[in-house]
Amino acid sequence: MVFVVLFSTLSFTISKHYCGDKLVDTAIFQEAKTCGMEKLQVLTNSKCSVTKKSCCSDEHLVIKGQEEMKLSSFDKLSLEQQLFFTTFCYTYFSLFNAIEQKENNFKDYSPPLIVRDIHLLDEVYLI
């Protein structure tokens, strides 16, 4: 549940750098690396100067998360919902409790020896 709340409220930016029509770099949470050709080229002469437009372009995609969250308290739930929630939590957390193992008090004693075969005495045969 924490992950759902975290990712639904998270906002981030995807930055892309294109050189002409080719995608050069993509970055999340930071600026994309450039190809180095994005600077304006200025050709100067003694009488005139010409600026050449760059072939590079940047694209920024902003994905906004949820701004407002609806908070509800336990008191606003109905009695049946409160009962269900508490029993669910109790049984869920009870699953992870360690089960106590019973001690075997008779492990040091051997079983009695069989003097006669009881199946033959009672004439009980397994078919």
Image (cartoon, rainbow, N blue to C red):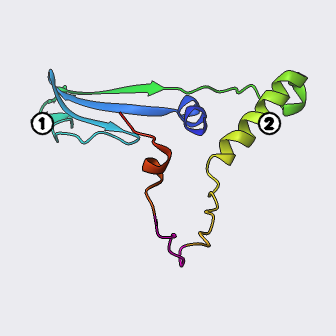
Residue hosting label 1: 44
User: In x, y percent, where is residue 75?
Assistant: 90, 31
Quadrant in which residue 27 is drawn: top left
* Badge 2 density bin: few <14, some 14–19, many ≥20, Cα 10 Å: few
Q: Relative to 47, is 103 on the left or the right?
A: right
Quarter-wise, where is residue 10 in the image? top right
| Image quadrant where one finds the N terminus | top right
Q: Main secondary structure of the magenta part?
A: loop
Name above or below for residue 123 compared with residue 97.
Answer: above
Residue at 22 percent of width and 40 percent of height: 34
> What stretch of residues is rendered in magenta?
107-115
Can residue 29 be seen from the camera position used here?
Answer: yes
Q: Residue flagged by tag 1: what amino acid is it?
A: Thr
Residue at 80% from the left image edge and 36% from the top image edge: 86
Q: Is residue 62 above or below residue 99?
A: above
Helix, strand or loop at disc 1?
strand
Q: Residue at x 61, y 51 (%)?
A: 96
Q: Quadrant of residue 37?
A: top left
- Whichever of callouts 1 and 2 sits on the residue coming sooner in the sequence is 1
Q: Please identify the quadrant where the C terminus is shown.
A: top left
Q: Residues within 10 Å of mark 1 (few under 14, many from 20)?
A: few
Q: Which three-letter amino acid code belongs to the residue tagged 2?
A: Thr
74 lies left or right of 63:
right
Residue that numbered label 2 is attached to: 86
47 sits to left or right of 90: left
Residue 52 at least partly seen: no
Tell me which residue sits at (9%, 35%) in the image: 45
Q: Secondary structure at mark 2?
A: helix
Q: Nearer the viewer, residue 103 or 91?
A: 103
